[in-house]
């Protein structure tokens, strides 16, 4: 446990008017649906982190990256605090693969207006801001 917030990067990957979500396992908020992403490494640029995390987790390459909003996320049960920076991108094509099966049990595409439940806390907080990546 850190006494300071950690920085997470959540990547909203868009393809055919849908967004990619994975079902978390063996991590805080197991069983929730989240965007690909992870922790920002020391000295790493945010957009580079987004490309790296999506490739490591799904095998997909992304393009047209742009910074989105951020959320301030308190995971009370785990006593963790993250600032999550969102990146909006488009998939260059291909099928998402489960490349980290110990962390994710499925990748699926969803319409923005029919996201699955339960959602990962940063996504819930993002939705509370009324953010829509298709109109941003």
Image (cartoon, rainbow, N blue to C red):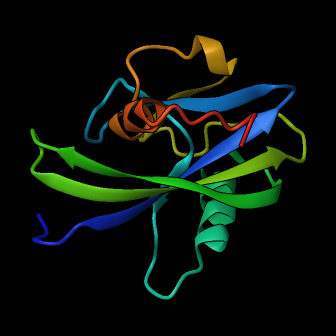
The image quadrant where one finds the C terminus is top right
- Report which quarter residue 20 is drawn in: top right
Give the left or right position of residue 116, taking residue 96 as reference: left
Give the left or right position of residue 122, taking residue 23 as reference: left
Q: Is residue 44 above or below residue 34?
A: below
Q: Residue at x 69, y 37 (%)?
A: 97
Please tell me which residue lies in front, 127 or 9: 127
Q: Residue at x 21, y 56 (%)?
A: 81
Q: Where in the figure is residue 93, as x and y percent of width and height?
A: 90, 40
Q: Where in the figure is residue 83, as x and y percent of width and height?
A: 35, 59
**Tally of marks:** 0
Q: Where in the figure is residue 50, as x and y percent of width and height?
A: 63, 61
Q: Is residue 76 above or below residue 47?
A: above
Q: Is residue 16 above or below residue 43?
A: above
Q: Residue at x 39, y 41 (%)?
A: 122
Residue at the outermost bottom position: 43
Q: Residue at x 17, y 72 (%)?
A: 4
- Report which quarter residue 35 is drawn in: top right
The image quadrant where one finds the N terminus is bottom left
Q: Where in the figure is residue 36, as x and y percent of width and height?
A: 57, 45
């Amino acid at each position: 446990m850190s006494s300071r917030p950690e920085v997470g990067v959540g990547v909203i990957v868009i393809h055919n008017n849908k967004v990619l979500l994975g079902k978390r396992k063996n991590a805080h908020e197991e069983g929730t649906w989240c965007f690909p992403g992870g922790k920002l490494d020391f000295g790493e640029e945010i957009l580079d982190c987004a490309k790296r995390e999506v490739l490591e987790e799904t095998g997909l390459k992304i393009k047209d990256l742009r910074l989105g909003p951020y959320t301030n996320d308190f995971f009370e049960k785990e006593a963790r605090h993250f600032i999550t920076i969102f990146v909006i991108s488009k998939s260059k094509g291909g099928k998402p693969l489960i490349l980290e099966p110990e962390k994710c049990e499925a990748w699926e595409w969803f319409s923005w207006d029919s996201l699955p439940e339960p959602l990962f806390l940063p996504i819930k907080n993002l939705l509370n801001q009324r953010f829509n990546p298709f109109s941003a």
